[in-house]
Amino acid sequence: MNINIICIGKLKEKYWQDAVKEYSKRLGRFCNLNIIELKESPLAANPSRADEEAVKTAEGKEILNRIKGGDYVVTLEISGKSIDSVKLAGKIADLGLQGKSTIDFIIGGSLGLSAEVSSRSDFKLSFSAMTFPHQLMRVILLEQVYRAFKINNHEAYHK
């Protein structure tokens, strides 16, 4: 299975980079992982609502350009559906059984996702009603994808 993490922004801090590197290494046993970092669009110091929408639209176009037609798209959204780790594992397993070879997980920038990206989503996933920095969200997502593969392979890790 191919797992793509399509995200806005680069990880600047070494501790985030190290965590992503570790989970990427662990996931190598289970899937082909690609992390696609897209450039953040510049935002004015005191942005108007229109400025913010323009940034989300620009970032959204870049995200949509990276999604292939047959990919199954999971957007991370506060308003998405909350599921536990076992259900996420089941969803990934079911997608594989349905012949979906590529899952794209989408993490938006600091302003969130454009309406166009959200509407392209096949599944809107929420990790919490709280807002997390997108750098931290990447690490949490990778850990949960790793946990899902461990669950699906009946390996010790999930408790």
Image (cartoon, rainbow, N blue to C red):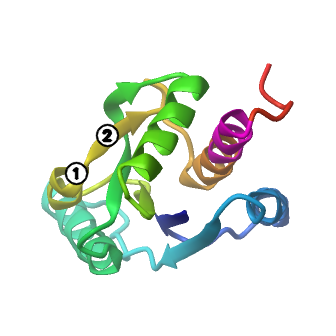
Q: Amino acid at mark 2?
A: Lys
Q: Say which label, 1 or 2, has the lower sequence index.
A: 1
Whether tag 1 and tag 2 are in contact, CB under 8 A, the answer is yes
Provide the residue span drawn in magenta. Answer: 145-153
Instruction: Give the left or right position of residue 14, taking residue 93 as reference.
Output: right
**Mark 2 element type:** strand
Q: Main secondary structure of the magenta part?
A: helix
Q: Which residue is mark 2?
A: 124
Residue at image x 70%, y 33%? 151
In this view, the residue in front, 65 or 112, is 65
**Where does the C terminus fall, quadrant-wise?**
top right
Q: Amino acid at mark 1?
A: Ser
Q: Residues within 10 Å of mark 2 (few under 14, many from 20)?
A: many
Residue 150, x across and y down, in percent:
74, 40
Q: Is residue 88 above or below residue 53?
A: above
Instruction: Give the left or right position of residue 122, taking residue 105 as reference.
Output: left
Residue at image x 68%, y 50%? 139
Instruction: Give the left or right position of residue 135, taking residue 122 as reference.
Output: right
Residue 143, x across and y down, in percent:
70, 44
The question of residue 95 being in magenta is answered with: no
Q: CA distance from mark 1 to mark 2?
A: 8 Å
In this view, the residue in front, 46 or 150, is 150
Residue at image x 20%, y 68%? 57
Instruction: Give the left or right position of residue 20, taking residue 3 as reference.
Output: right
- Residue 118: give its label: 1
Residue at image x 15%, y 52%? 119
**Where does the N terminus fall, quadrant-wise?**
bottom right
